[in-house]
Amino acid sequence: MKNYQKVNVPVGEARAELHNSLNLTGAEVSINNLPAGAGVPFIHSHQQNEEIYAVLSGRGTMMIDGETVELQAGDWLRVAPAGERQLSAATDSAICVICIQVKAGSLEGFTMTDAVVK
């Protein structure tokens, strides 16, 4: 078995979840594209997972616990598990985000302390 998996996600696909195609075991990763004026149709929180959002392109907002957080390309946002969130694209701009879910408090080391240098 190889020590890696590679997948190509077509640009512009509405939502791509990568857990199965990359055989992820420690994170959930999705790519989300919302057209201008569209939004996720529900508010949600998590029991254990924090989410990290990376805005790749466009503009929008994330409603978190009733507060509107403006988003634009280049922004990164972490939302704690209990945060009630809902993502929307701006009325005049689509938005493309990567969402990474990981169990809160599970990180045991960073690259410099976890890497094995050969």
Image: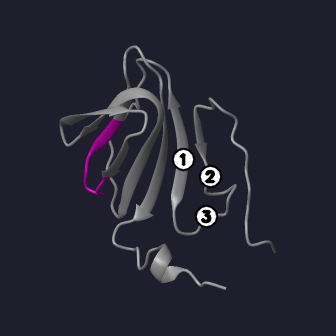
The residue wearing badge 1 is 30
Q: What stretch is highlighted in magenta?
A: 79-86
| Amino acid on which disc 2 is placed | Leu
* Depth check, front residue: 19 or 112: 112
Relative vertical location of residue 67 with respect to residue 94 in this rendering, above or below: below
Relative vertical location of residue 15 with respect to residue 113 in this rendering, above or below: above
Relative vertical location of residue 55 with respect to residue 21 in this rendering, above or below: above
Please say if the residues under marks 3 and 2 sit with CB atoms less than 8 Å apart: yes
User: Percent position (x, y) of residue 28?
Assistant: 52, 57
Q: Mark 1 falls on what kind of element?
A: strand
Quadrant where the C terminus sits is: bottom right
The residue wearing badge 3 is 24
Please say if the residues under marks 1 and 2 sit with CB atoms less than 8 Å apart: yes
The CA span between labels 1 and 2 is 6 Å
Q: Image check: 115 left or right of 70?
A: right
As drawn, the residue found furthest toward the top would be: 92
Quadrant where the N terminus sits is: bottom right
Q: Mark 2 falls on what kind of element?
A: loop
Q: Which of marks 3 and 1 is nearer the N terminus?
A: 3
Q: Residue 18 carries which label?
A: 2
Q: Which mark is residue 95?
A: none
In which quadrant of the rendered view does residue 90 lie? top left
User: Percent position (x, y) of residue 116?
Assistant: 59, 84
| Amino acid on which disc 1 is placed | Ser
Which residue is at a point 39% across and 53% down the rendered structure image?
51
In which quadrant of the rendered view does residue 67 lie? top left
Q: Which of marks 3 and 2 is nearer the N terminus?
A: 2
